[in-house]
Image (cartoon, rainbow, N blue to C red):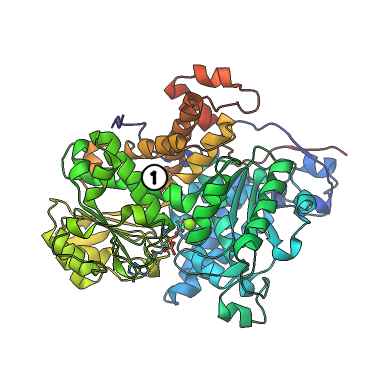
């Protein structure tokens, strides 16, 4: 059942224990001397205590004074602030890349400090390591490249992957984010340059879910690119060939999945930013064989559903009213179709009606306009959501966004088209005629320049009474007279870390619809009534560890209920099944990795 209990108050738990973590246990290291200084997993820079310098052969390799973690932290933040001051007035792109560079350099040098500043300042740093700046980084990857991160499997590696996978230095991998670079955010085919996305997503995994960074693996599957500009770029770092297609393509992904499974049978693989046809095909192909999910289809669906349910509550209406909400989805790709599927299932579940009846309030628009059964070459993936012309009086096949909005007067206009500015002044003004008392506009496409509209335009043209959400962050809007138009961030970052962590701790070997639905239900019930009534549908990014603990626990409990949980580490399935809901949340929370300098002990 959909319930709306208030969960634990959202607080920045990381901030409150900034430097007061318990003394950590020792960490075994198999190297000595300069090798340690050059390994970001173990490096403490000037923070190595003198006794450790003796033990590890570091004496003389560092300046004599020991600088505490707190001092190192403050020194980094001071450098970051000076960079901000020194770049004031410079073009946004320049400033964003400069900020990314300073963070990336720390990441390359000292992971413990990097993840601590990231966790403590997640709201400020997420837009740099994740959307929108990560998009810019991918676009400029070849020029920004200094050292590799993650693994690259290319079409040229066919037949070699089973042995290549052993080139990864870590013994255990828990979480893999995999892309083929074919649809990077709304930026299209970026080929090998798309590796920035798995790196950014896994940084969010560490920050939000506390997945141990020694156990993450970003992967690029380079099967070529159809981006002509990149193919002609002499500095392009990927295969300079057109993308593999059909069976040739699938045989590469198959081989990769088998190789991962052979070395780390319990590793979870998150498919990310695959073009639609392969997103659906690979999900269908692997979801019953491997522990995997597609974030763009399934993670986005849960986040959007939580927001859609929030818009019902924001109107002061009971959830059963979800069945009467008219929702226009613009974008019939992996994300838009995933959202429709899950939202329709939720309407059917809440109202007890059939999925066929539940569809009647949803309208789907793609690049050719309103999708109806009269469409020539209607894609099989979109077919279940196509309108029968009999049911859309005044509208016809291919109707434009403005025609649909004028006719339907929807409660919600949700964009997952990747087309910036498509919710133009005319469309937004038409939303003033919405039948809702609180019309909702979700401009979910990324990065910022691909958002269907800006927050300012949404409030300016659609009115002050709207609920607004975007995939990439926007500032809240000053509406004058002390009023503020709240900006929600409707991004799958609220779910994928919890889906991964919950699955990992459950020890399940598959990720089921039930586990994903539990994640969505948990996010939907996270916000308090008074927040929702003020148009705040999602928690602040500051509380992402808290949200992730709740979501992770919900996923874990769903796995237990479905008898899929096999346990993790010392905690077996029986113990998991005996945990209360609160105990499960505590268990998940206590398994989150938190960056502190551990004493290093050398072992040959
Ligand atoms: N906020 C979030 O958490 C997420 C946002 N996204 C964003 O959603 C966007 C789409 O992602 P996918 O569905 O995977 O892409 P996709 O390429 O599979 O689908 C794009 C869809 O938009 C439609 N479209 C293109 N031009 C259009 C136009 N002028 N009018 C109406 N529809 C148009 C296409 O026909 C297609 O159906 C991207 O920008 C991505 O960054 C995706 C996943 C999560
Ligand atoms: C957020 C995300 O996954 C995307 O824009 O593709
Ligand atoms: Mg994505």
- Residue at 52%, 24% in the rendered image: 563
- Residue under label 1, please give it: 302
Total labels: the figure holds 1
> Is 469 on the left or on the right of 269, as rendered?
left
> Is 583 on the left or on the right of 358, as rendered?
right
Name the quarter where the N terminus is drawn.
top left
- Residue at 60%, 26% in the rendered image: 566
In this rendering, the answer to whether 392 lies above or below 289 is: below
State which quadrant residue 417 falls in.
bottom left
Q: Which residue of the protein is positioned furthest toward the right in this rendering?
A: 604
- Asked whether residue 461 is in view, the answer is no
Q: Position of residue 231 (x, y in %)?
A: 62, 79
In this rendering, the answer to whether 415 lies above or below 231 is: above
Nearer to us in this view, 381 or 270: 381
Q: Position of residue 272 (x, y in %)?
A: 53, 55
- Asked whether residue 595 is in view, the answer is yes
Nearer to us in this view, 205 or 179: 179
Q: Position of residue 30 (x, y in %)?
A: 83, 42
State which quadrant residue 28 falls in.
top right
In this rendering, the answer to whether 373 lies above or below 120 is: below
> Is 321 on the left or on the right of 144, as rendered?
left
Q: Position of residue 533 (x, y in %)?
A: 20, 43
Nearer to us in this view, 416 or 475: 416
Q: What is the crowding at mark 1: few (fewer than 14 residues within 10 Å), some, or many (at least 20)?
A: many
């Amino acid at each position: 059942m959909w319930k709306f209990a208030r969960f634990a108050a959202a607080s920045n738990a990381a901030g409150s224990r900034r430097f007061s973590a318990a003394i950590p246990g020792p960490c075994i290291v198999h190297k000595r001397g300069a090798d340690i200084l050059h390994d970001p997993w173990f490096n403490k820079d000037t923070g190595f205590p003198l006794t450790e310098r003796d033990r590890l052969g570091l004496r003389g390799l560092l300046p004599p004074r020991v600088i505490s973690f707190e001092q190192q932290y403050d020194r980094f933040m001071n450098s970051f602030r000076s960079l901000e001051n020194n770049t004031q007035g410079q073009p946004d792109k320049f400033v964003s890349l400069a900020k990314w560079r300073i963070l990336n350099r720390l990441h390359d040098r000292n992971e413990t400090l990097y993840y601590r500043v990231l966790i403590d300042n997640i709201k400020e740093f997420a837009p740099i390591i994740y959307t929108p700046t990560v998009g810019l980084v991918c676009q400029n990857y070849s020029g920004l490249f200094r050292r590799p991160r993650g693994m690259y499997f290319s079409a040229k590696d066919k037949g070699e992957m089973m042995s290549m996978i052993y080139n990864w230095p870590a013994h255990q991998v828990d979480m893999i984010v995999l892309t083929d670079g074919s649809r990077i955010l709304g930026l299209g085919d970026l080929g090998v340059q798309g590796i920035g996305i798995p790196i950014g997503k896994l940084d969010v995994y560490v920050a939000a879910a506390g997945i141990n960074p020694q156990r993450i693996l970003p992967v690029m599957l380079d099967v070529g690119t159809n981006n002509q500009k990149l193919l002609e770029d002499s500095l392009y770092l990927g295969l300079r060939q057109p993308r593999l297609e059909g069976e040739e393509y699938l045989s590469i992904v198959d081989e990769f999945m088998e190789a991962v499974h052979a070395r780390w049978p319990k590793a979870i693989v998150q498919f990310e930013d695959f073009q639609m046809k392969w997103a659906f095909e690979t999900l269908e192909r692997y979801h019953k064989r491997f522990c995997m999910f597609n974030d763009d289809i399934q993670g986005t669906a849960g986040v959007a559903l939580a927001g859609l349910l929030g818009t019902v509550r924001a109107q002061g209406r009971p959830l059963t009213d979800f069945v009467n909400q008219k929702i226009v989805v613009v974008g019939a790709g992996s994300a838009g179709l995933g959202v429709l599927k899950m939202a329709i299932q939720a309407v059917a579940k809440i109202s007890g009606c059939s999925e066929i009846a539940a569809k009647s309030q949803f309208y789907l628009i793609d690049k050719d306009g309103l999708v109806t059964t009269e469409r020539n070459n209607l894609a099989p993936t979109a077919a279940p959501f196509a309108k029968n012309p009999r049911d859309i009086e005044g509208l016809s096949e291919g109707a434009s966004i403005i025609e649909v909005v004028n006719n339907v007067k929807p409660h919600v206009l949700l964009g997952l088209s990747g087309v910036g500015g498509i919710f133009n002044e005319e469309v937004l003004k038409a939303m003033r005629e919405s039948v809702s008392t609180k019309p909702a506009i979700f401009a979910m496409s990324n990065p910022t320049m691909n958002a269907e509209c800006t927050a300012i335009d949404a409030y300016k043209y659609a009115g002050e009474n709207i609920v607004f959400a975007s995939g990439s962050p926007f500032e809240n809007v000053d509406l004058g007279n002390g009023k503020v138009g709240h900006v929600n961030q409707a991004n799958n970052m609220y779910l994928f870390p919890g889906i991964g962590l919950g699955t990992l701790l459950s020890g399940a070997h598959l990720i089921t619809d039930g586990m994903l639905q539990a994640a969505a239900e948990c996010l939907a019930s996270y916000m308090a009534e008074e927040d929702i009534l003020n148009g705040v549908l999602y928690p602040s990014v500051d509380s992402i560890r808290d949200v992730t603990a709740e979501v992770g626990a919900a996923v874990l409990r769903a796995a237990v209920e479905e008898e899929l949980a096999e346990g993790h580490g010392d905690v077996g399935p029986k113990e998991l099944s005996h945990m209360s809901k609160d105990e499960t949340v505590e268990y998940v929370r206590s398994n989150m990795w938190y960056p502190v300098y551990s004493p290093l002990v050398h072992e040959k």
